[in-house]
Image: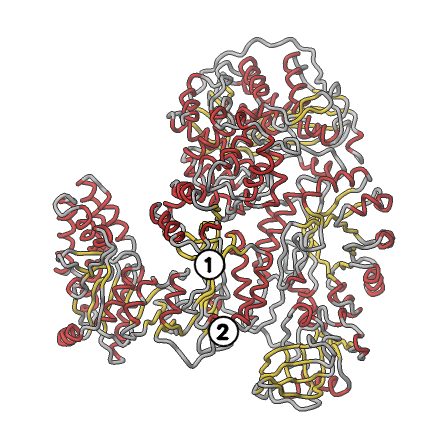
Amino acid sequence: MKFGGTSVATLPRWQNIRELVASRRAEGARVLIVVSALTGITDALKQLCAEDDQDKRRACAEGIAQRHHELLGHMQLELPETLGERLAELERLAAEGPAVMGELAWQALVQAHGELMSSALGAAFLTHSDLPTRWLDARDCLDAAALPNQNERTRLLSAMVEAKPDPALATRLAALGEVFITQGFIARDADERTVLLGRGGSDTSASYFGALLKAARVEIWTDVAGMFTANPRQVPGARLLQKLDYEEAQEIASTGAKVLHPRCLSPLREPRVPLLVKDTNRPELDGTVIGPQLSEYAPSVKAISARKGITLVSMESVGMWQQVGFLADVFGEFKKHGLSVDLIGSAETNVTVSLDPTENLLDSDAIAALAGDLARVCRVKVIAPCAAITLVGRGMRSMLHLLSSVLAEFDQIRVHLISQSSNNLNLTFVVDEDVVDSLLPHLHELLIGAGALRTDDSALFGPSWQNLYGRGEAVAPAAAWWREAERQRLLEFGAQATPRYVYHLPTVRAQARKLKTLGAVDRLHYAVKANTHPAILRALAEEGFGFECVSPGELKAVQAAVPESAPLLFTSNFAPREDFVYAFSTRATVSLDALYPLEHWGDVFRGREIVLRVDLGRGLGHHEKVRTGGSGSKFGLPLEQLDTFLRLADAHGVTVRGLHAHLGSGILDDGHWAEVYGQLASLAERIGSVAFLDIGGGLGVPSHPGEAPLDVAALDRRLREVKAAYPHYQLWMEPGRYLVADAGVLLARVTQQKSKDTLRYLGLDTGMNSLIRPALYDAWHEIVNLSRLDEPGTTLYQVVGPICESGDVLGSDRRLPEAREGDVVLVAQAGAYGKVMASPYNLRDEALEIVIE
Amino acid sequence: MTDPRQAQVFRFVRHGYADGVAELVYAFDDGAELVERVSFPGAPALPAGRETAFAAALRLLHLVAGVSYYKAALPPRIEVEGAPLDEATADFLDQLYLHGLAELAYRNGLDLRGRIRFPRGAAAPAAAPALGLPRRTLVPLGGGKDSLVAVEALKHAGVEATVSWVSTSPLIAACAERTDLPQLNLHRELAPGLFELNRLGAWNGHIPVTAVNSVILAVAAILYGYDSIAFANERSASVATLEYEGQQVNHQWSKGYAFERLLRDWLHAYVAADLDYCSLLRPYSELAVTRAFARLGGAYFDVFSSCNRNFRLLGPKPADRWCGQCPKCHFVFLALAPFLPKPRLLAIFGRNLLDEETQAAGFDALLEYHDHKPFECVGEGGESRAAMYTLSERPEWQEDALVARFRSEILPQLDPAQLALEPWLAPAAEHLVPARLRPALDAIGAA
């Protein structure tokens, strides 16, 4: 059992260690505890080593001794002799300085004292707490290996140990006692000198001991429950990995995860000793077990990670084609300039390599010098700053076909290098660094959505980090209205006639009220294109919403349904001249998103106030077709045309009263809108006449089980923050799908079934003609057999409609109860962009709409 | 008022100072009063003997800060209530308003010549005496490289200095923290009525904000006791951005040498003979300054920003400080590139602007290729060309999209003899730095 610096720094943490060790004893295990130095002590020892002045070194040693005396005081223990010896030795070393032993050997011995002291202190505490514990000098067990590529510094300060099972040592210890405590980080070399194991040394020590003793397992106790599918700081929805094999874990550790040092796994691989990562504060959590390869699980991506600060060097030359020794010469230059190469991608005339970030790389002229030398033999391009995004999982190649929607995400960004090693464990993309922070959570979500990261397998994947460590308790989503309360009524509707859309107004109102808690927002408009049913329009008017329309038809529908007092927006795109003429005849506030209308139809706008929709230059959203920002999208005025637009507006006496941007749909990141507001505000400051900023909608609605919903309170906090920075603008929003998606369902009946190879098709009496989102956006809608809602899912169905299109698939690979003709099937989250996008294609009857008040 | 542009008279109504707050009142015609407040936190009681100096500085602040309001309507008449101005002061203000608003006039197709005339009629007062002000220096901070170079140079020269800035800016506050010097954060609160005027269609555009901030600092110097104000305006700030119908238009006129000398002379004559106003960077080109920053500014690489987009909320990422699209981003990137290791520069910006083909037009403008110089505080075209030429000779840069484009498309049209970097690094003779601060001046020029 290994405990790190924070775990050994205070009395309560030592009491915790005692409990944990005692529980292992109770299971009948003999325990070897490996400890780090108290938090901050290793740094203090390094500081001591850096002092040239003897008095200052002694003062450092005094301070370090004081820390240990204080902890002893809290433990109400006398100074044990073992610790007293260490303190005296440290004082002597501090007084003596490096001259006698030599700089490096002295440093190693001084720094080793952190662990020597903490373990001595721990032995005393545990023994005193009725857990007899023997102190073991790690240096008597761990012999540093002499390796050919080592220099004196690495030999002494980052040594390696070849740990092979040593039955003699195991027997010797068995004779001595049941519980031992020893030091991480230190070993002894052939010259009997104390050496250090370097970074991550204490974990590595634990592994060495695990291998030497062929332990039942090695437990690394730390401040987090294990390894996750992604860095939780970047992806709060990252899931705990409960089982990994050594190679996967090592790959994850070396591509970004900080929980384990990659070095600590290899000693365990051969003796097949499993390693368990556990959270000291939450011992009840399962943690991550790392062991030999598992066979009984379907291949899955296990983790996605990103390493930033990567520099690429791309070398291009026809000279390398079939040229013996070209690459050897090229790589020789890297060695000469002290740069270590990580990834390599090559083509006939190009080799691109990646360099990991080091201070040396950032602040020396190494790159300039390297480029200068390389330029003599090839064309060199230095590409930076980049980030390497790595997918890790055994059997990566067999999953490639699942990654198409994930890879589509790379379509809009520059991928500089792709690498897939022959160990079949990883797939790495090197991209521009600035896209990574927003890309990573999105890719994580896409991997789950694509079925490549099989979070549905609860044996492999535990709870999300957010669930374990996020703010407050994870609230289980309330059961959908159709699941319990209205199920019977829906079955009756289904029995009468299908297909049918059913809308639940209480859900619309509840969503509306959630958004009304956004105190920072001055005005909310419902984007009516999502669903123009008059009952929904009326309900939202009653909740005080304004209405955003994109066509004269929508304006007319809204005006027919809602009172005169409800504000209207007209936000069209490539609309004809007469649409604007009509819109100005209503009370709507009119938006423009191009120069053309002012250039050619200036008279329509003369003296009017308008809203300008700008394109902030990038798009977001869950699918390419729902992104509405970036030059690949037809929406919005590009920023470089802003000055021209303002000149035109001035010439026609048009006042720009509002600025609007809308970047896409299905966005679940609460920081996004604040960013849009900030960008719009900085533009508005240049315009003067602007009174409000409309940051659009696109509030995401989670569709997959376990996906975290948008945090409305967090969104409000972020908006209040930016609004405080720009208090003189009103803030408008235009949510659509968020208000109505969950309120609607599509009911259909089972027609026929078919088997094809291993696939089972379940036919419904409607498909893409009623609900086109799955075909158009790859949207995922939950599908249930309402007639058999309580039966377990046994059959993996492809749920399809009756339309003559191979894309007429409502859901793939859905585990449902075995169905029968006439069963009522419910497609959830169909309240937005369902009926409004339905078509008469194939001349099948349209789905009628029913409203539940 | 319905249409601000129809106003006939701009009136300097009154000004006052009490409890650390200066109140500056303006009006158009007989319209509502526009009240601006400038606050001086923790202001001490005004030391005896400085009353006349303070009154003169405060009145100048009223007159200079008025440019923010005058520009909303640009009316044909200016009225100054209270004691009449003397000829020299009125001339100074005429120049400031005319040149400081030249860009706004150009952008709106207006000609202000002959329109701006401050009323005058008093005799010049007696020359101001020396006040024995404490020998310490106020250094205004902008969050960009220039003022940080000034700060480091002053520290290097052992000058007692306080960093100061006007209004709230998390960017400047973060930089100020890193300087390890005492801080003085002053506040300027514009009259709320100005926003209303803007909504009603007021003229809008650039104002000589450095002039306003300079005079706020002059008031502060008398109040708190400083004998010098050391700005960080470099040589190219004096170069006109363009000439329009016979008038020089300079986006940064109030950062130029002409304004520096006008204000320095005015402060010496009317406020205190021992209050110095100068720019430490005046003899240096932008390139000399970026070279100094690469050498002295290491502590600020991850906090500073010269980006023109006003980031009011800062985050840890480069994209939270650098928009990467504006002329300032383009120029600072280009001008630092010859002096920093490439990976370090790219880490500062979080991206490589010279490898983005879509940025070609922006860099062309800096090089004065196809386009005139942008309206921003950026270096001269020759400096950008010299920096780009230097990069085009460096293997680690020359394959980047815009450097490669420069080599193939622009360079053949240029005379390589005119593209050397070194001449830009030599200081000019012109500056107003007092003897006490000379060592700081020299620290900047040291290679």
Residue under label 2: A398
Residue B105, horizontal then vertical, whole percent: 72, 28
Residue under label 1: A306
Determine whether, in the image, residue A94 is placed left or right of residue B195: left
Determine whether, in the image, residue A819 is placed left or right of residue A369: right
**Placement of B183 over or under A392, stated as above or below:** above
Tell me the CA gap for discs 1 and 2.
22 Å
Q: Residue at x 56, y 20 (%)?
A: B257
Label 2 marks a residue whose chain is A
Quarter holding residue A741: bottom right
Q: Given the current orientation, which residue lies at the most extreme bottom position?
A: A820
Do the numbered discs 1 and 2 sit on residues whose CB atoms are within 8 Å? no
Of the residues shown, which amino acid type is indicated by label 1?
Answer: Ala
Q: Of marks 1 and 2, which one's residue comes earlier in the chain?
A: 1
Determine whether, in the image, residue A234 is placed left or right of residue A816: left
Residue A36 or A749: which is nearer the viewer? A749
**Placement of A380 over or under B264, stated as above or below:** below
Determine whether, in the image, residue A187 is placed left or right of residue B210: left
Residue A707 or A253: which is nearer the viewer? A253
Residue A690, horizontal then vertical, whole percent: 71, 43
The C terminus of chain A - image quarter: bottom right
Would you call the spot at circle 1 few (<14 residues within 10 Å), some (14-19), or many (20 or more)?
A: many
Kindly tell me whether residue A285 is visible in this rendering: no
Of the residues shown, which amino acid type is indicated by label 2?
Answer: Ser
Which numbered mark, 1 or 2, is in the foreground of this view? 2
Kindly tell me whether residue B435 is visible in this rendering: yes
Q: Secondary structure at mark 1?
A: strand
Label 1 marks a residue whose chain is A
Would you call the spot at circle 2 few (<14 residues within 10 Å), some (14-19), or many (20 or more)?
A: few
